[in-house]
Amino acid sequence: MCLALCSEGRVSFLCTESRVDKQECLTYLSVRECAVMLTGRKLGQFRRRLSSWFREFQRDLPWRKTRDPYRIWISEIMLQQTRVAAVIPYYERFLERFPNLRALAEAPQDEVLRLWSGLGYYSRARNLQSAAQQIVEKHGGEFPRREEAVLSLPGIGSYTAAAILSIAFGLRKAVLDGNVARVLARLGAIRGDLRKQKRWRTLQTTAEKLLDPKSPGEWNQAMMELGATVCTPRAPQCLLCPVAKFCRARQLGNPESFPAKSNKKAAVEITLAAAILTDSGSRTLLLPPPQRGKKRPDVHDVATLVSGMWHFPTVAIRKNPTAELKAYLAELLQSKGDLPQLEPLAKVRHAVTYRNIEVLPFRLAVAKIPRIDGSKKIPLEDLSALPISNLTRKIALAAMQTPTPPTEKRASLFFRPSC
Ligand code: SF4
């Protein structure tokens, strides 16, 4: 029997499993928040079980066929906040166009964004390219092997650095992301918000202790794979789990209740109105990537909502969509006369993190696309030649699904000359 205190010093606990040494007692360990989970023979068994399961059942993914740090890096960045199935075609296209780090560093940013277009979270692509440029400048184009050097690159945090360095170079560094943290929390029956600094640090220590020093890259992938395919958030498949016998949450009978749900930020509802100016050749007006100010933008900031990419003339709506869109267009186009009629198209809905965006697209049939500095006149179906966000893509789709009115109905004279 042993008496234990939790790592926060609040809970005392009497372990009744008198057979086991306290270092191996899962109940004891859960109270200690997983500070040390398994040692000796049990640790070896745990590693063997997980590793052989991974070798047999891992998914066949393109980035698992390489030890090239550049390719692993691209996959890790693309996989942030994005499902594996969605990433695969992007990963392959991206590497076909930018087969190595120098090719990425030297490419025009527009081209990088265009190939990222549709994956979302575009700051990832911008950071990727700027990190590639830094690697060329400071490391002669060779991906650095030192952890501090990798962590100093834009867009790379401790999880990504550990993943790249362990898989590509065998560095003994454990990864800890949401999937791995969930697995650890269930193994140790840890309650509470895992993202709390102290708890996250404890989890990192636990992950380091479990890491198999003989094959850290494979080990890290095995832990991530377990979290992604078996120990899933809502319905863990404990019957298929290679390490079920070590799992405290399973012993308690309610693994899905670990860890505690974090309090989600309340969703913000945003309404936008977008203008799709269309001429008789189905060409439309697209505005260039907006300049972003230094100040932190508010939730209605259009530049942020279009991901800083090419976009339709768009305005955030407070009360009256048509009046506010007309006022915005009158200023944008410096129109002297009346605007043509706004033809409402099917509404578009788009969700990004905590923002629920509703876009009211309006078509304006015009004789000529007006000239605006930096803008482009482009056929609707060719929009993907430019870097555009998913939001813009959805608006374009709404326009393409509604037939264009006949030419004679087009307004002709209120705009300045065509570009
Ligand atoms: S036994 Fe179940 S809850 Fe525990 S690690 Fe395996 S899948 Fe997750």
Image: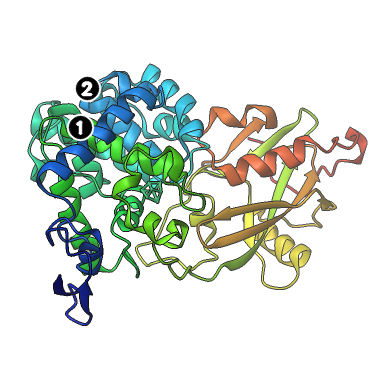
For the N terminus, the image quarter is bottom left
SS at circle 1: helix
Q: Residue at x 51, y 43 (%)?
A: 288
Task: Name the one closer to the observer, 363 or 184.
Answer: 184
Asked whether disc 2 touches disc 1, contact meaning CB atoms under 8 Å apart, the reply is yes
Classify 277 as above or below 28.
above
Q: Quadrant of residue 270?
A: bottom right
Q: Residue at x 29, y 35 (%)?
A: 222
Residue type (three-letter) at the residue carrying disc 1: Gly
Disc 1 under 8 Å from ligand 1? The reply is: no
Q: Residues within 10 Å of mark 1 (few under 14, many from 20)?
A: many
- How far across and down, in percent of the image, does residue 389 sit? 54, 42
Task: Name the one closer to the observer, 76 or 250.
Answer: 250
Q: CA distance from mark 2 to mark 1?
A: 10 Å
Q: Residue at x 34, y 37 (%)?
A: 242
Q: Residues within 10 Å of mark 2 (few under 14, many from 20)?
A: some
Disc 2 under 8 Å from ligand 1? The reply is: no
- Number of the label disc, if any, that sits on residue 201: none
SS at circle 2: loop
Q: Quadrant of residue 398?
A: top right
Residue type (three-letter) at the residue carrying disc 2: Arg
Task: Name the one closer to the observer, 118 or 281.
Answer: 118
* Residue 161 seen: yes
- How far across and down, in percent of the image, does residue 193 sit? 35, 68
Q: Residue at x 44, y 21 (%)?
A: 93
- Applied colour scheme: rainbow
Instruction: Kindly identify which residue carries mark 1.
Output: 217
Task: Name the one closer to the observer, 223 or 77.
Answer: 223
Instruction: Kindly identify which residue carries mark 2.
Output: 67
From the viewer's perspective, tell me whether residue 140 is left or right of residue 353.
left
* Residue 152 seen: no
Mark earlier in primary sequence (2, 1)? 2
